[in-house]
Amino acid sequence: MNLILLGPPGAGKGTQAQRLEESEGLVQLSTGDMLRAAVASGSEIGRIAKPIMEAGNLVPDDVMVTMIEQRIDRSDCANGFILDGFPRTVAQAESLDDMLRRTGRRLDAVIEMAVDDGILIERISGRFACADCGAGYHRRFRPTAVEGVCDRCGGTEFRQRPDDNEETVKTRLAAYHAQTEPLLPYYREQGILRSVDAMAGIDDVAARMREAVGAARA
Ligand code: AP5
């Protein structure tokens, strides 16, 4: 099964992709994580992406398409993947369609995570992650069980993303509305768009996501 999670910054795509990865046995492909790894490694792609990400804008389509094409080709994606953060423009969606057609694969569902803009700033500004294993948390909505200690690896160092500040989030939201929202009618026309109300708590949204995936499997 091949899925796309579509939603604005802070909608919970990463949080829910990790849960679906475990429950459905799929591989999460987060283009944001791939880009952050490229920035950390100082690669050519990282050098291109760093200032664009820090400003909250979108990295050029050709860079993103090449990156995802190479990743989808790897053997761990053979049983299915969850795209988290890709595609983000109609041009990226068209390239993905071509890529899947060429390799005899298809998308089973595109799940829109619908959230009002008003709560996104709070979700994003409270987000932090373990510096060792990358496990994601939120100061209010998903704190560590023991304060200052990662639930997953016991690490005690945490970090915040440089693009998680109010000003950049506004630019990221504007980019979502202008460049990514047109994907909703694009996938609706293909008959594979499902919408999940993602305003509830993490566990309730997870239950709705599993329901949407189950309906797509049926
Ligand atoms: P990316 O890393 O993809 O960021 P994003 O789309 O802005 O999404 P986020 O990671 O901020 O949010 P999320 O929806 O995953 O929310 P999360 O689960 O963490 O991209 C970063 C940048 O890279 C882009 O701006 C762009 O520059 C570039 N880029 C990436 N892909 C690209 C592409 N294809 N083309 C061009 N450029 C690209 O949740 C947020 C917080 O809320 C967490 O703390 C979580 O614990 C909490 N939370 C989650 N769900 C709930 C809930 N239901 N209730 C309460 N709290 C919740």
Image (cartoon, rainbow, N blue to C red):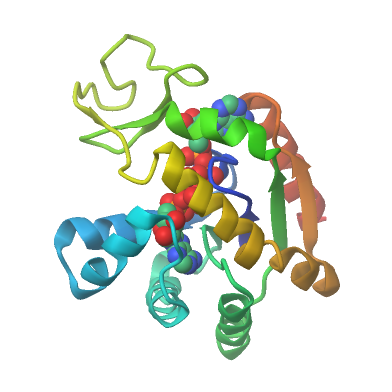
Kindly identify the residue that appears in the image at 54 percent across and 40 percent down. Answer: 10
Quadrant of the image occupied by residue 33: bottom left
Q: Is residue 79 left or right of residue 162?
A: right
Horizontal and vertical percent position of residue 196: 76, 43
Task: State the residue lying farthest toward the top.
Answer: 146
- As drawn, 148 above or below 45: above
**Residue situated in front as seen by the camera: 66 or 124:** 124
Q: Quadrant of residue 93?
A: bottom right
Comparing 142 with 61, the one in front is: 61
Where residue 137 sits in the image (x, y, percent)?
Answer: 41, 27
Q: Relative to 29, say whether 152 is above or below.
A: above
Quadrant including the N terminus: bottom right
Asked if residue 28 is positioned above or below residue 121 in the image, the reply reads below
Q: Residue furthest left?
A: 42
Q: Residue at x 20, y 35 (%)?
A: 132
Residue at left offset 19%, top offset 21%: 156
Left or right placement of residue 11 versus residue 198 in this view: left
* The C terminus, quarter of image: bottom right
Residue furthest toward the front?
167
Q: Is residue 5 visible?
A: yes
Q: Position of residue 103 (x, y in %)?
A: 55, 86
Q: Is residue 14 visible?
A: no
49 sits to left or right of 156: right
